[in-house]
Amino acid sequence: MSGDRLAKFKEAYRNLDLLPLLDQRELDRFRVSYGEEVLEELQQLIEDDDTRSGKTIFSGHRGCGKSTLLAEFGRRCEKNGFFVVFFSIADLFESPDVSHTNILYAVAVSLITEAEREGVEIKPSLKDPLFRWFATRTRIESSTPVSADLSAGFDFKFVKGILKTEASVREEIKQEFEQKISELIARINIITAEIQTATRKQVLVIIDDLDKLDLGDVEKIFKNHIKALFQPAFRIIYTIPVSSLRDSALRAVLVTESNDQIVVMPVSKLFARGDRRLPDAQPIAANVQPLCDILHRRISDELLPPEIATQIVFYSGGVLRELIRLSNICCRLCLRRVRRQPDEATVIDAEILKEAVQDLRLDFETTLSKADYDILKTTYERLQPDDPKAQAFLDLLHGLHVLEYRNAEIWYDLHPIVIDLLKLKGQLS
């Protein structure tokens, strides 16, 4: 009995580690349909772009499911005849090292990698200048002279590994190409033209995880260098954090340069505006059920009673990553309990959920100052902060202490676990 239950919780724990869903097998097993309106909006912007070089800004809260949705969108575009390159900037560069130069270099590397994976030969004269410099500094080549053709057997996975782990290499790439940005963009455009000629498909590049950058870095990259980022002659989707859109100067730049092609993925509203405060509040069932389905796809019904699944959904605030994070902690606690009490029929019960919520509450509390508590209290009471553009508020929005919701207007609420925290602190009645 205990061994069987232990195995089931281990499987659930593994299943909860699968986020975002990028692999087709993972999608087939775990994906629950959501975000169809957002997918339709993206499809319209991409497919109806007569210039074939439009740039789309895709935004939303961290953890709201953007990566899974973009992966699904990329697959749909492939079926509709696009040559899709989907990559995470986090797989190539650490956040502090991300610059407009490194983003464009990552685009070049990813285009070549996907082209060769699809059997499209890119001329050595296009590839070698990107990697010969790289090879001389990292000694990727063993016996091959530096002047030789680097295209034969070049290990792009190894290149990505070096980019991810070697800070000095990332900095040298930035220095090498920053003064040659026009040349780099021209090379990217020629590579893209070769791909389109060989495949007879239009290129779409989707760059994920730029929304995980610090707000100051996002502003610096997009406000100061958006001309360079938008210069490649093919469609690109850039991700940015939703808090960046509160910066009026940055938003104006994004609206102008993208021709107002900004798509925001909203957080699922579990309650109507202000209803959460009511003692008899009725949730929006159409938004709650998909999140419950996500849990039951990953955790056996035997381990997760439906009423507890619903409570986990409420505590998530409608944020997908928070849903998974809280469930993951619950499974960890249950795995410990099964080992400690092997004869008990352990399930994720109210006691386990209470302990998991406490763990997350401590995480939220760690970074808060007195001024933060004042902002949170005001936001809770008014569903708006005093100043939605204040940096302190934007930091709370970026950290998911505050959640942004949209219907006819934009309004804000606190993460449900943060509401619990403020009540414990005596800030709320």
Image: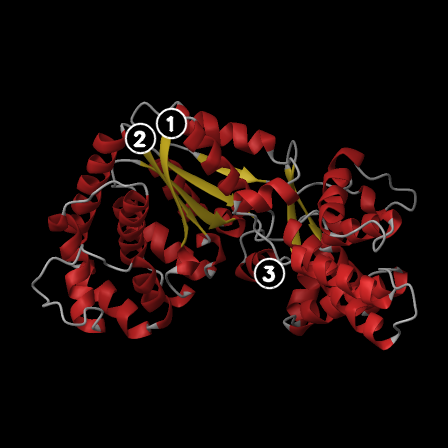
User: CA–CA distance between discs 2 and 3?
Assistant: 37 Å
Q: Mark 1 sits on what residue?
A: 81
Question: Which residue occupies the foreground of this view, 219 or 303?
Answer: 303
Residue 144 as seen in the image, left or right of residue 78: left
What amino acid is at disc 1? Gly
Q: What is the CA distance from the residue labelled 3 to the residue labelled 1?
A: 38 Å
Q: Residues within 10 Å of mark 1 (few under 14, many from 20)?
A: few
Whether residue 415 sits left or right of residue 100 in the image: it is right
Local crowd size for mark 3, using a 10 Å CA cut-off: few (<14), some (14–19), many (≥20)? some
| Vertical placement of residue 390 versus 287, above or below | below
- Please name the residue shown 82% across and 61% down the image: 428
The three-letter code of the residue at mark 3 reads: Gly
Q: Vertically, is 400 above or below 53? A: below
Looking at the rendered image, the disc whose residue lies closer to the viewer, 3 or 1, is: 1
Of badges 2 and 1, the one in the foreground is: 1
Q: In which quadrant of the rendered view does residue 15 lie? A: bottom right
Question: Is residue 314 in view from this perspective?
Answer: yes
Nearer to us of marks 2 and 3 is 2
Question: Which residue carries the number 2 mark?
Answer: 202
- Position in image of residue 41 (x %, y %): 51, 29
Image coordinates of residue 398 in percent, x first then y, are 56, 57
Q: Amino acid at mark 2?
A: Gln
Please identify the residue farthest to the left as the structure is shown: 147
Q: Which residue is mark 3?
A: 399
Q: Residue at x 26, y 50 (%)?
A: 108
| CB atoms of marks 2 and 1 within 8 Å | yes
